[in-house]
Amino acid sequence: MSITIDQISKTFGRFHALRNVGLDIPEGKLTALLGPSGSGKTTLLRIIAGLESSDTGRILFGGEDVSNLHVRDRNIGFVFQHYALFRHLTVAENIAFGLESLPRKQRPSKAEIRQRVEKLLEMIQLPQLADRYPAQLSGGQKQRVALARALATQPRILLLDEPFGALDAKVRKDLRRWLRALHDEFHFTSIFVTHDQEEALELSDQVVVMSQGQVEQVNTPTELYAKPESRFVFDFLGHVNVLSGVIKNQKLVQGDAWISLPGNRSEQKAQLYLRPHEVHLARAPSAFARLPLRIDAVSLIGSEVRIELTPEGWQSEEIWEIGMSHNEFAQQNPSRGELWFAVPDVGHLFSGENSQPKTVDWLYPETANACNV
Amino acid sequence: MSASANTSVAIGRRFSVRSKRVLPGFGLSLGISLFFVSLVLLLPLTGLVVETSGMTWDQFWFTITDPRVVESYKVTLWTALAASLFNGCFGLLLAWILVRYDFPGKRILDAFVDLPFALPTAVAGITLATLFAQNGWYGQWLAKLGVEVAFTPLGIVVAMAFTSLPFVVRTVQPVLEELSPADEEAAVSLGASDGRVFRKVIFPALWPALVTGIALSFTRSLGEFGAIIFIAGNTPYVSEVTSLMVFIRLQEYDYAAASAIASVVLLASLILLFAINLWQGRYLRRLEGR
């Protein structure tokens, strides 16, 4: 069941939670609504569910207008951040709740309900906990039960509101993988809300980035990361190193730092955005860039060595981060307190009022120009 | 070995009260509390027992099974039951609107709920008696319907309900406030009807508090005196409550008999309170997963 969101607006008092949001959610895909708090993502999810009503606009499920349909008639499964399990009911009773709420004509027999619950318990890998009460479960177990409960009535659409937000890192990772596997098996149309970019990129087929009640960009995780269309998306998805300065003589200059930008003749303010993996370190400045930086910290944990640096002789609002492989690290052996030079390979230039970046490639200038939008 | 070490650690944790508390003074605060409880509660209760100890069992039994007294038990019990059940329904409704809805005058209404506690019960009794008397504001209309409230057992119910209403509202209200809206939303998203949401989700969460509120209201009604005597009419065998019997014995300077009857009321209240506490403890333990 595909979902169409048509010109949805919502205000809470004087606060614009959503402004004319339009979106298409493809059938059978896992879509992430990603954004900082206050971006309207949860409000949008709740409007899709019918837990909240929109001021204007329509919601369509598979072409059918459901805007005026009550939550209970929308046939959706909703998973809450804090599980919202019924405390006085056992795990099995919680899962059976939806089936037992069906109108008498559609309600399966007691034996059938018990069977369905058993099956769902197996699906969430917790058959031994059927008679426990929610208070006796761990957070991860609770969220699985909540998921089984939401799926019991075989909803057309599954909506998850920050489903892993209240869990610790390890459980979150497990559960994420498990949800992905579950989704690949059953292919329900699902939307989940998150403020964690890693979660959104890892788990979803499509990411909707939201900011201040508007959709910033919609794309697959890979495309989104590779081609952010605005400063906001750039900033929000992972760490980014910024050199902001003025373009003069085909160079972006700030203090002691400069990067050559061949072909940029207009004199104006600009920012160059560089991902940690798009920069490497050298002992001396290169022919096309001089970015002196002092090493603050070296973190060896993970598949990559992460180096934190502060600008020397110029300024940056945030610290710079450069990633290198353990192999490179062993060869170059940069250590804390040393002065190094950053050498960009690829960068993304935002100049003037332009909200779309221009890709600059110093390694292979010809291909970069061809790629420019 | 490790198992025994674990249990000893667990036992140690449970009993070593003075270990590593953030705030000191457990011994002192518990001591003062116990002393005060003894002074104002246990000592007078003991006095009650001591007073009756002058009686033989036969005398005691004779006093508390006096037909007029037994009739007062019956009247007190059924009126208290009726009043507390009425309060259960109305108090729940009042708590519900106070928590769930916003309307002008909500704060004032909220404050008014405590009025029965603030008002001297005698004042409440006189006011109610005036209102419900044959020529009172309510009484004259009720008389047309053939309902007599003042100076009948029904009046007792009214007085009891009035004085003990806050118990239900004030026990249910905080629980209702803490109910997570997500629980209800979850139930609705699973297709439950409004009635089912109330029966299966809201009510089970309120149930322990509601029962406690009703029980408190009931025990308070058992002992209510001031508000009742003005409106009850105090007709022997019809509208006399047990606390009035105690009062009458006192006026006759028969302290032993008064204490004997009082001890019956006390015992009934204590048993009820303990039973509620036990039941509630068990119910809550399940919710908290212990």
Image (cartoon, coloured by chain):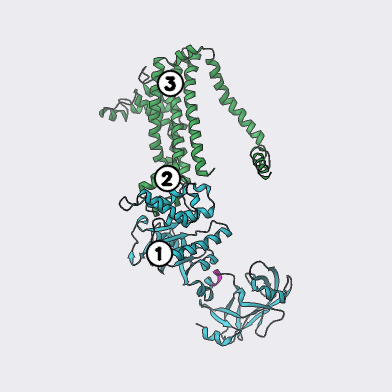
Numbered mark located on residue A261 in the image: none
Instruction: For marks 2 and 1, give the one nearer the viewer.
Output: 2
Q: Are marks 2 and 3 in contact (CB under 8 Å)?
A: no
Residue under label 2, please give it.
Answer: B202
Name which residue lies at 39% across and 45% down.
B198
Instruction: For marks 2 and 3, give the one nearer the viewer.
Output: 2
- Magenta segment: does it hold A238? yes
* Crowd tier of the residue under label 3, counting other residues whose Cα lies within 10 Å: few below 14, some 14–19, many 20 or above: many
Element under disc 3: helix
Q: Colour of chain A?
A: cyan
Image-based side of B131 in relation to A171, left or right: left
Q: Give the letter of the chain under mark 1.
A: A
Name the N-terminal-most of marks 2 and 3.
2
Q: Position of residue B263 (x, y in %)?
A: 49, 20
Residue under label 3, please give it.
Answer: B242
Element under disc 2: helix
Of the pair A290 and A185, the residue shown nearer to us: A185
Q: Which residues are magenta?
A: A234-239
Residue under label 1, please give it.
Answer: A9
Of the pair B2 and A226, the residue shown nearer to us: B2
Image quarter in which the N terminus of chain A is found: bottom left
Q: Are marks 1 and 3 in contact (CB under 8 Å)?
A: no
